[in-house]
Amino acid sequence: MNLNECIAYHKANPQIYAMFKRFTNEAIRSKRPRYSSKMIVERIRWETMIKAEHGYKISNCMTAFYSRLWMLENPNKKLFNTKRSILDGLKLKHL
């Protein structure tokens, strides 16, 4: 997925990022210094497919998007380690 596709998916599915933020905040309360954004996306999949009996198809590319978006919104909190990505240029003005 490219940046425009990620933004379009995000705008069409705001509930997924809401869950990403909720589960990320739970991770922060666990007092761990770092947490995996992939684990958070997998939890979203679990919560929506197993517990709620419906699920969201979430591309693995969206993991990088959501972690970078969260870091843009929370610049003083360093929770996720990242690798180089085409999403490194993401700015809040894109949304």
Image (spheres, grey):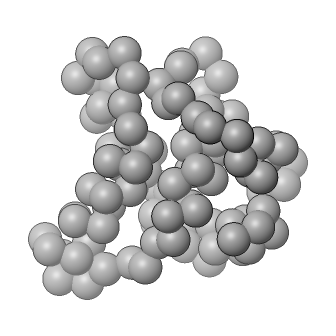
Residue extending furthest toward the bottom: 54
Q: Which residue sits at x=84%, y=54%?
A: 94
Q: For the view shown, which residue lies furthest in the front direction?
A: 84
Find the residue positioned furthest to the left. Answer: 51
Q: In this view, does 50 lie above or below 44?
A: below
| Image height of 82 relative to 13, above or below | above
Q: Where does the image place residue 85, in percent across and percent down from the top left? A: 71, 47
Q: Is any part of residue 62 visible from this angle?
A: yes
Quarter of the rendering occupied by the C terminus = bottom right
Above or below residue 23? Residue 48 is below
Query: Which residue corresponds to the image point at 65% horizontal and 22% vertical from the top-left?
Result: 75
Q: Is residue 92 at all visible to an observer of this figure?
A: no
At x 56%, y 61%, the residue is 62
Q: Where is residue 74 in the image (x, y as percent from the top left)?
A: 60, 27
Q: Which residue is drawn at 27% across and 16% down?
A: 31
Closer to the camera in the image, 54 or 64: 64
Judging depth in this view, the residue of 35 and 95 nearest the camera is 35
Coordinates of residue 15 in the picture (x, y in percent)? 46, 66
Q: In this view, does 75 lie to the left or right of 60?
A: right
Percent x, y of residue 82: 58, 35
Left or right: where 74 falls relative to 90: left
Q: In which quarter of the image is the N terminus?
A: bottom right
Instruction: State the image quarter where residue 27 is shown.
Output: top left
Please tell me in which quadrant of the rendered image residue 10 appears.
bottom right
